[in-house]
Image: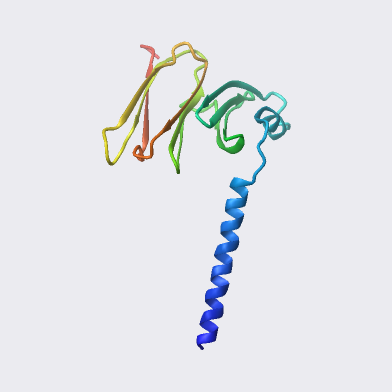
Amino acid sequence: MKKNKNIIRLIGLLVVAIVLSIIVGKYFFAKTVNPEEFLRDKYSNKPNYSIKVQKTNKHFSGFLGQDGENIYLDLFRGGKYFGGSVASIKQRDLVWVYQFQQYETLVVVYGYNPDLNYLSYYLEISSTTTEPKVIKKDISKEKYILDIYVLDTKYNGTANLKLIKKPGK
């Protein structure tokens, strides 16, 4: 009976070791990519796709693309594909927040302001240990919005976005 428990424990440890090696190998040994080439390949089936805005903050770079129907956010960290999001430009809300936290808090505000109806935004990122971080940004002249904020992990709460529209819109 004791021998069976030891075998089960050994199998469990091997499974954990295999999973960890896959995760670590995928992150640490993944090849860096040229983001423009990566995106060209990724969206090769969308002939109208084009990159509209590119921004960098610390080790993150973001690309905002459009194909006529959707807005595409693609993020890279240290030259490796990190993730992204897709949103339809036919939606009522055209500015979104992408948020991720691990070693730092990443908050990306991205969207589409085609008629320049949005004047600015307020972004409030909450924290359990300090006052919330409040960011105000004028976007009255930006058709495409892409802002990358890399914050300390003490800002571990929700990022709330409030858009200010032109009067009468």
Q: How many marks?
A: 0
**In the picture, residue 99 is in which quadrant?**
top left
In the depicted view, which residue is nearer to us: 67 or 52? 52
Q: Where is residue 33 drawn, in percent x and y? A: 67, 35
Q: Where is residue 151 drawn, in percent x and y? A: 40, 33
Position of residue 126 relative to residue 138, above or below, is below
Position of residue 41 relative to residue 29, above or below, is above
Taking the image as shown, residue 18 lies to the left or right of residue 142, namely right
Quadrant, the C terminus: top left
Q: How is the image coloured?
A: rainbow
In percent of the image, x 54 and y 69: which residue is there? 13
Q: Where is residue 9 drawn, in percent x and y? A: 52, 75
In percent of the image, x 38 and y 36: which residue is there? 152
In percent of the image, x 31 and y 38: which residue is there? 127
Q: Where is residue 48 drawn, in percent x and y? A: 69, 23
In the depicted view, which residue is nearer to us: 40 or 131? 131
In the depicted view, which residue is nearer to us: 84 or 114? 84
In the depicted view, which residue is nearer to us: 144 or 82? 82
**In the picture, residue 41 is in which quadrant?**
top right
